[in-house]
Amino acid sequence: MAQPSSRPRRLPRLEDVAGLAGVSHQTVSRVVNNHPNVSRETRHKVEAAIAELGYRRNTAARSLVTRRSQTIGVLGSELSQYGPANTLLGVERAARDAGYFVSVAALREVTRDTILDAVRHFLDQAVDGIVVIVPHMATVAALAELPIRVPVVAVGSDGNDAVGGVRVDQRKGAELAVRHLIAQGHTRIGHVAGPQDWIDAVARAEGWRSALEAAGLEADLLVEGDWSAGSGYDIGRRLAAARRATALFVGNDQMALGILRALNEAGLNVPTDISLVGFDDQPESAYFSPPLTVVRQDFEELGRRCMDMMLAVLGGEEGPRTLVVEPELVLRSSTSPPA
Amino acid sequence: MAQPSSRPRRLPRLEDVAGLAGVSHQTVSRVVNNHPNVSRETRHKVEAAIAELGYRRNTAARSLVTRRSQTIGVLGSELSQYGPANTLLGVERAARDAGYFVSVAALREVTRDTILDAVRHFLDQAVDGIVVIVPHMATVAALAELPIRVPVVAVGSDGNDAVGGVRVDQRKGAELAVRHLIAQGHTRIGHVAGPQDWIDAVARAEGWRSALEAAGLEADLLVEGDWSAGSGYDIGRRLAAARRATALFVGNDQMALGILRALNEAGLNVPTDISLVGFDDQPESAYFSPPLTVVRQDFEELGRRCMDMMLAVLGGEEGPRTLVVEPELVLRSSTSPPA
DNA sequence: GACTGATTTGTGAACGCTAACAAGAGGGCG
DNA sequence: CGCCCTCTTGTTAGCGTTCACAAATCAGTC
């Protein structure tokens, strides 16, 4: 329990444990690595010595010889936003549970160069795999460009033979939202999209379009924002003046908040005058005025799945290279039949 | 430029570069580490060889001998929230700029055990330092408990000789908010606090109290939430019914959102019936209905400062062990003189 | 009781790097 | 010319693991 009075100047190593247990360093190594061929008795002796000395194996020495670092690199952008942040958390949890370290590189700006730079950073660290949470179109292209020697799993992308993909079915989510509005009797349904260099933004716009077309409705009211509440506000003001739609499918919750604010200022009521559906379901959305009907995606689950796929690849499994998570429609009070 | 047709099976090492440049491996090492005593000519030869082979130094081998891993561990909780997430980003940026890797461990639950577990995780990785973004009271105590051999900087804590501290002056932020309300003529100013096992929550409550007392006003209306919009909503409903205060200083923006929703439902107007000040200033707060007056804290700057302090300590500097960042009051339309 | 095969343990050599020291080259000066 | 000093380069020995192999032990069998 108590610390030994004089602290040794170096951390104990295999050799020290071996000496105390009266075995060779190799035997200790076998115990530490759970090799089968160690007698019960020896194992106990060694474990006792390990406990007594507080031995922990040296990661650097280990990776030097195994050429594996037990580290997963997570390359992310917009990591302060609800979605990416929770995906990161999911990855971290699954990784640490599996005995991996998680190294993070955040991109402030997403360009070919910043991506390559971050990947180099990870390769310098000799990560065993890279999880990419950079939902831009540019990402996949940039990744394909450089000969990475380690497995890569990219969130939001479709998998291919070089890069695994785990994503939420954005298109389906969009269809859920739009079909709900159609079912309520809306016929003029607009879409406030995210920037079209984002994979998800494109997929959501496609889902919006396909759902409308399937119902024989016109898909002609699309405006592009930048995901921020501010851009939602600006768009909301314009839409309030035009009043062409009775319902809006909005690319994310933040823009929906800005739109809500603009409509409110313009004296329009949600949902009576205009219905609104958001996307993501951050915890706050349930407390907007009015509470926002949304398409929910489970980001943490997404992150966990990424890591599952990564572990499978690292384990040499041949499994699927792409994995799709289902979104879910959550009804609240920002939608109602048109007046 | 082009890849050599047959890719070597191993990555090049010092020896390979040395062979190509016609020098010893040690000279190459000197070039790589920017040692001064290398002739200009040799340096050029070596650099050319490095470039030709695409040599990158092996981190594991390097840390094995230097006993330094060039890695900073970031221990965080609530990392999906705006504040902690941005602090992490600040740390990451500063760390990567300084040539460090950033390893993350996220706590799902903050207890003595989970903290110790994560610290052990980092020590196994032989991190050079640990940045702690776990704004709970329990943190400092838990950290003090175990003999960590590396520098620790904790966000939100006051520094002591064992642990460096970088924090925003929460108390001052609270005072700014409350003084603003007092200046507008409010005399019944309540506080919706965060959980009192959070360092910041306590400091904000203290600031609220001290500002009121300094003005000779009663500090008797304090309710405790859990930071979430949901708890803000519940509290808001109760306060709307009681109507004891004409202004509320709210512990964070999310709770303010919930309160806004509750007051709205109750038919009360903000700011006419009740003024509201939030804390943090997440980007959305400017688009609440009405836009929220807040105390802003610069989380990314906070993270950068953490890393600055860490680098100073790692560099052997004796500098200050505690660092305070100033908050700022941002006026929007959720505050006005009482009716 | 020697032979076979499996199980358990030990030995030596990497892994790729840096630190410490040694050696060689060159310059200034008496 | 010889001495000392500085600058540059090379040599050797670890750092703490794991891997490949060798050796020792233990049964079981004829």
Image (spheres, coloured by chain):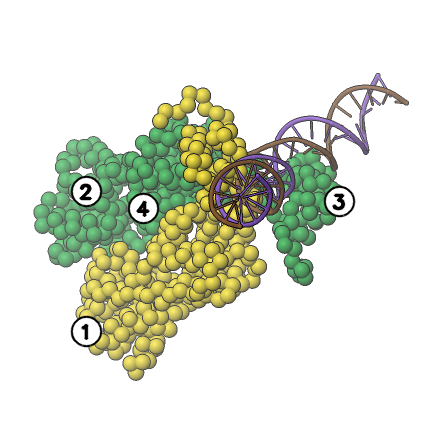
Chain colours: A yellow, B green, C purple, D brown
The three-letter code of the residue at mark 3 reads Gly
What separation in Å lies between label 4 and label 3 (alpha carbons)?
Answer: 54 Å
N-terminal of the pair, mark 4 or mark 2, is: 4
Tell me where residue B138 appears, x and y as whole percent.
Answer: 29, 35
What is the chain identity of the residue bearing mark 4? Answer: B
The three-letter code of the residue at mark 1 reads Pro
Label at residue B108: 4
What separation in Å lies between label 4 and label 2 (alpha carbons)?
Answer: 22 Å
Residue underneath mark 2: B224
Tell me where residue D11 appears, x and y as whole percent.
Answer: 73, 34
Q: Nearer the viewer, mark 2 or mark 3?
A: 3
What separation in Å lies between label 1 and label 3 (alpha carbons)?
Answer: 80 Å
- Local crowd size for mark 2, using a 10 Å CA cut-off: few (<14), some (14–19), many (≥20): some
N-terminal of the pair, mark 4 or mark 3, is: 3
- Local crowd size for mark 1, using a 10 Å CA cut-off: few (<14), some (14–19), many (≥20): some
Q: Nearer the viewer, mark 1 or mark 3?
A: 3
The correct choice, above or below, for B300 with respect to A184 in the image is: above
Q: Nearer the viewer, mark 4 or mark 2?
A: 4
Q: Residue at x 68, y 53 (%)?
A: B52
Tell me where residue B5 appears, x and y as whole percent.
Answer: 68, 61
Residue underneath mark 3: B22
Tell me the element at label 3: loop
Q: Residue at x 38, y 33 (%)?
A: B165
Q: Residue at x 22, y 76 (%)?
A: A183
The correct choice, above or below, for B147 with respect to A327 in the image is: above
The three-letter code of the residue at mark 4 reads Arg
Tell me the element at label 2: strand
